[in-house]
Amino acid sequence: MSDTYPTAVDGLRLIHGGLSDIGRRRTRNEDSIGFFPPADRNGSFLVVVADGVGGSNAGDAASQLAVKTIGDVFFARGEPAHPAVTLHEAMQAANDAIIAQAASDPHQAGMATTCSCVVLRGNTLLIGHLGDCRVYLSSGGNLVQLTHDHSLADEYAADGRELPPDQVHLSNVLTRWLGVEGPAPVEISDVMQMNDEDTLVVCSDGLTKTVTEPEILHTVSMHLPAAACRRLVQLANDRGGPDNISLHVVRLTRF
């Protein structure tokens, strides 16, 4: 069942659903999700998806640590006065926590995770992002990707080049993640507006590998957030579920 919350805008409510699934081919779930509602209706909601980097040690531990640290640090002093600054600090703290944990346990050496976070307050949103999790906005019958993947394939595309046929595997090579020495290369967006009945989708690449954007748009348009999450995960699994599948669906509505 979807959960409904009042927001800082009179009469505007937030409906949330979230789900993380192991998929059909993985032996463990290296994704983690977090949803942190405010202490009162005037505060910010924090939505987090983290995807432990495949091939690294303890990707599941890295993603769990990222979600917990970001939630703890973002709200450590109550409602942040400067959300963009605080979100950057929280994501950097997660990077530092992952590095420290990896250094203390040889079994977790090299662990890392991608991560996308959304801060929602009233009808505004702010994104912190690195890696290939994605944030989409469904608005006015269209689905717009608000983030871009930090991968070698995306760098080629940004330069107007296509991947050579013998290097298509580069589409899976990441260029940013949490778990790097020094400052984490986090992207923080400008503040954006959401309209009544707009819907956000924050997801790991286990969804977008198998489910198309038109299918995501149709599903979140036809169902409440929790039901949309279940249907999208089922669709990904029906197509083989090659990766862990995690997502949040968040809708603003008046009723």
Image (cartoon, helix red, strand yellow):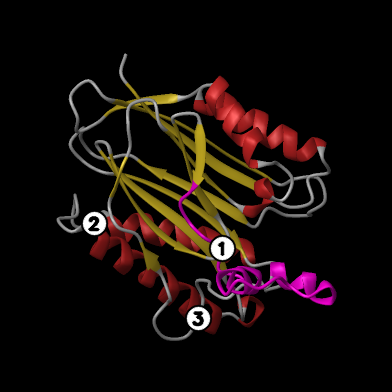
Name the residue located 41 percent from the left edge and 86 percent from the top edge. Answer: 182
Query: Which residue matches tag 2?
Result: 83
Within-10-Å neighbours for mark 1: few <14, some 14–19, many 20+: many
Type of amino acid at the residue the image marks with label 2 = Pro
Name the residue located 32 percent from the left edge and 32 percent from the top edge. Answer: 195
Q: Which residues are magenta?
A: 145-172
Query: Which residue matches tag 3?
Result: 180
> Alpha carbon of mark 2 to alpha carbon of mark 3: how far?
23 Å
Q: Describe the element under mark 1 as helix, strand or loop.
A: loop
Q: Tell me where residue 117 sits by quadrant.
A: bottom left
Query: Which residue matches tag 1?
Result: 149
Q: Nearer the viewer, mark 2 or mark 1?
A: 1
Q: Is residue 161 magenta?
A: yes
Judged from this view, the residue extending furthest toward the front is: 160
Residue 176, horizontal then vertical, whole percent: 53, 73
Type of amino acid at the residue the image marks with label 1 = Asp
Q: Describe the element under mark 3 as helix, strand or loop.
A: loop
Mark 2 in CB contact with mark 3 (< 8 angstroms): no
Rendered view: 78 above or below 18 = below
Judged from this view, the residue extending furthest toward the left is: 81
Type of amino acid at the residue the image marks with label 3 = Val
Judged from this view, the residue extending furthest toward the top is: 255
Rendered view: 22 above or below 15 = below
